[in-house]
Image: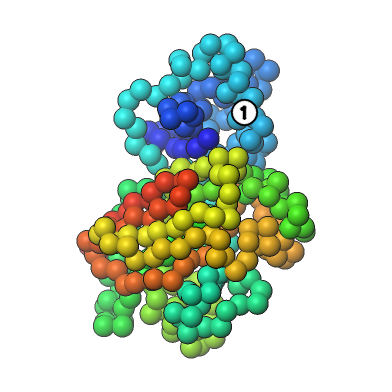
Amino acid sequence: MKIFSYGSNSAPALGFRFDGRNYSLSGLLRVYYFQSAKILPDEINLKSLLETGLLDLKVLETVVCWAKDKKILEDYRLKKDIKFLLPLWPGKIIALGRNFAEHAKEQGAPVPTEPIIFEKANSSVIGPETPVIYPSFIEKEYGKEARVDHEVELAVVIGKTASRVQAKEAMKYVFGYTIINDMTARNIQALDFKKTQPWFRSKSIDTFCPLGPWIATRDEIKNINNLKLELRVNGVVKQKDSTKTFIFKIPEMIEYITKYLTLFPGDVISTGTPDGIQPLKPGDVMEAEIEGIGILRNKIVKER
């Protein structure tokens, strides 16, 4: 099943894709929980539902089966074209650096022997078909050295609170998967490397974290360790690899991260990018695609 947000930014709603058709999840959940005298918040969003325990994989399955038994599922089918919005506003975004050996090599860096983790500000998040703003200050301050890159990455959406989790138990804490384009001001990152400073600012510029177009639930992906990743710029393939070449697999990531900090429902782990990073310019159109999930499309627009 795929979970998405749709409608307008002022009044978003949740939907789901089931058997190739789109349905209103917001509507079904209101009816389902009304019968048990549970009240949903006025604004239903994925993060709040995960936080309150009102939505998980078991609930999704139960609600769909209930709606089919009651013969009301078709009443909630979305029959018009819909606009997909940002599917989730993450709590925090913990990203892995150099989780593909070839990407480490193209940066002239050693292949890591333990996960390299950093945080990307959630204020940088935007949804599908939303412009990435190429900041005017980058060219003004850095001239020819200015460089902004794309980075296609598989994103893991956490479904329940995770602390000191062992790898063998880690997948129980995963709700689903989506796509992140980990945009990076590469020249600023390089400057911070030289100063031995964190590269947080180069990763967290406003609009530098496209996410979406929806979230594929954990059970939707049969083999998370063998998914094709690809990023195209103006139709030309720039990055191409598979999750089978991850240095650290998802259970290892979760175990390592939760040793140091607690992950909460709605937090996201961005799992690293393959080699092939390239500089972008205003007007470029990026398509980040991951097998079994979809295509995240965003255009680069120069700041006015």
Q: Is residue 6 above or below residue 107?
A: above
* Image side of residue 169 versus residue 300, left or right: right
Left or right, 28 with respect to 181, comes to: right
Residue positioned most to the bottom: 194
Question: Could you say which quadrant of the image residue 116 lies in?
Answer: bottom right
Say which of 130 and 275 sits in front.
275
Residue 271, given in percent of the width and then of the height, sits at 55, 61
Q: Is residue 46 left or right of residue 159?
A: left
Q: Is residue 227 positioned above or below 47 on the image?
A: below
Quarter of the figure with the C terminus: bottom left
- Which of 132/170 is in front? 170
Q: How many marks?
A: 1
Q: Position of residue 239 (x, y in %)?
A: 39, 65
Mark 1, residue position: 61
Location of residue 16 in the rendering, given as x and y in whole percent from the top left corner: 48, 32
**Identity of the residue drawn at 60% across and 36% down:** 49
Residue 89 visible, this angle? no
Q: Secondary structure at mark 1?
A: helix
Image: 245 above or below 174: below
**With respect to residue 302, does 88 lie above or below?**
above
Instruction: Give the x, y percent position of residue 3.
Output: 50, 37
Q: Residue furthest top?
A: 70
Q: Residues within 10 Å of mark 1 (few under 14, many from 20)?
A: few
Q: Residue placed at 38% from the left, 71% from the top?
A: 277
- Identified at 43% across, 61% down, the residue is 152
Q: Amino acid at mark 1?
A: Glu
Q: Quadrant of residue 149?
A: bottom left
Residue 11 in view here: yes
